[in-house]
Image (spheres, grey):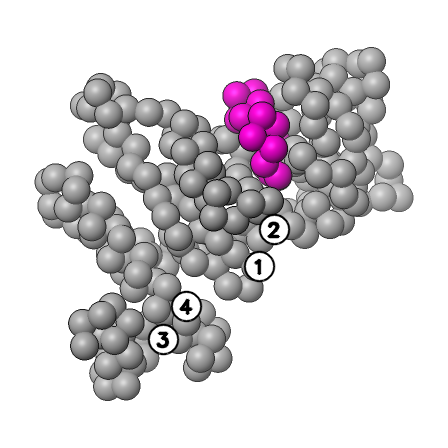
């Protein structure tokens, strides 16, 4: 029945989880159910109050008409993945992104940006070439509120990769999915504790100049590093 929608903050080098909201399945919890987009919007309002003007980076699951309208209405900066089957209106022509003549990239360029509309919402669309592991070239699309160069927009969006690393580490090494508690409240406490532990690992990663948070965790487990354990207790307010 439930999972989470989480928010992280990043500068491209350091990424830390800052908050989350619980998503409840409509079938099991009809009175508590909200869509993931609604939960994301609630998080965005909270974050924007604390950090006005912050850029929100999201994957393609959130780039709906409603989300774009929400961002425009609340004057929020955003950059999201845009699926190639989306129909957009650019320079008097409406077509799917992958078929749109006005968005095609010339052979001599890596990307381009155009101004257009998606279901009436004014947007900037960035198309760029990405080399896959197979060596093939794939055209990827982004939708953003900001008129920047394709290179800068792509560079900003790449910072979103940090959240994938957060979930990889918290799931594989910190037991994010391993809580046996049945109540949602206890599950949320567990998630919060995992995020606190992750933030500690990130801080120590930079202090010890480690490659990643996993190296600090392995160090603590392997040699039972007393200083790190003491610092963790202090960090959590235990000592």
CA–CA distance between discs 3 and 4?
9 Å
Counting residues from the start of the chain, the first of labels 3 and 4 encountered is: 4
Q: Is residue 154 magenta?
A: no
- Does any portion of residue 115 appear in the rendered image? yes
Q: Secondary structure at mark 3?
A: helix
Residue topped by disc 1: 12
**Contact (CB < 8 A) between labels 4 and 2?**
no
Left or right of 212? Residue 98 is right
**In the image, residue 140 lies at what x, y percent?**
67, 37
CA–CA distance between discs 1 and 2?
8 Å
Counting residues from the start of the chain, the first of labels 4 and 2 encountered is: 2
Q: Residue at x 72, y 32 (%)?
A: 125
Residue topped by disc 2: 158
Chain part drawn in magenta = 64-82
Residue topped by disc 4: 202
Q: Residue at x 71, y 38 (%)?
A: 146
CA–CA distance between discs 1 and 4?
13 Å
Counting residues from the start of the chain, the first of labels 3 and 1 encountered is: 1
CA–CA distance between discs 3 and 1?
20 Å
Q: Quadrant of residue 77?
A: top right
Q: Secondary structure at mark 1?
A: loop
Q: Quadrant of residue 218?
A: bottom left
**Contact (CB < 8 A) between labels 1 and 2?**
yes
Counting residues from the start of the chain, the first of labels 1 and 4 encountered is: 1
Work out which residue is located at the far right of the displayed protein and give it: 108
In the image, 68 versus 13, the foreground residue is: 68
């Amino acid at each position: 029945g439930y999972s989470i929608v989480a928010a992280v903050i990043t500068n491209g080098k350091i990424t830390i989880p800052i908050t989350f909201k619980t998503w409840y399945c409509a079938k099991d919890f009809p009175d508590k159910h909200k869509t993931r987009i609604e939960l994301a919007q609630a998080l965005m309002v909270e974050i924007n109050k604390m950090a006005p003007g912050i850029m929100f980076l999201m994957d393609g699951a959130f780039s709906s008409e409603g989300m774009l309208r929400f961002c425009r209405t609340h004057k929020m900066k955003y950059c999201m993945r845009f699926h190639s089957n989306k129909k957009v209106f650019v320079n008097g022509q409406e077509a799917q992104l992958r078929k749109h003549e006005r968005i095609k990239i010339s052979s001599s360029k890596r990307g381009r940006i155009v101004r257009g509309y998606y279901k009436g919402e004014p947007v900037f669309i960035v198309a760029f070439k990405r080399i896959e592991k197979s060596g093939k070239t794939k055209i990827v699309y982004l939708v953003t509120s900001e008129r920047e160069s394709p290179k800068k927009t792509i560079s900003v969006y790449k910072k979103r990769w940090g959240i994938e690393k957060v979930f990889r580490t918290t799931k594989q090494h910190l037991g994010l999915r391993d809580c046996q508690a049945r109540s949602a409240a206890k599950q949320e406490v567990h998630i919060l504790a995992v995020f606190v532990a992750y933030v500690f690992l990130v801080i120590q990663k930079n202090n010890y100049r480690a490659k990643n948070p996993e190296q600090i965790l392995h160090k603590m487990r392997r040699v039972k590093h007393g200083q790190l354990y003491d610092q963790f207790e202090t960090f959590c307010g235990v000592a």
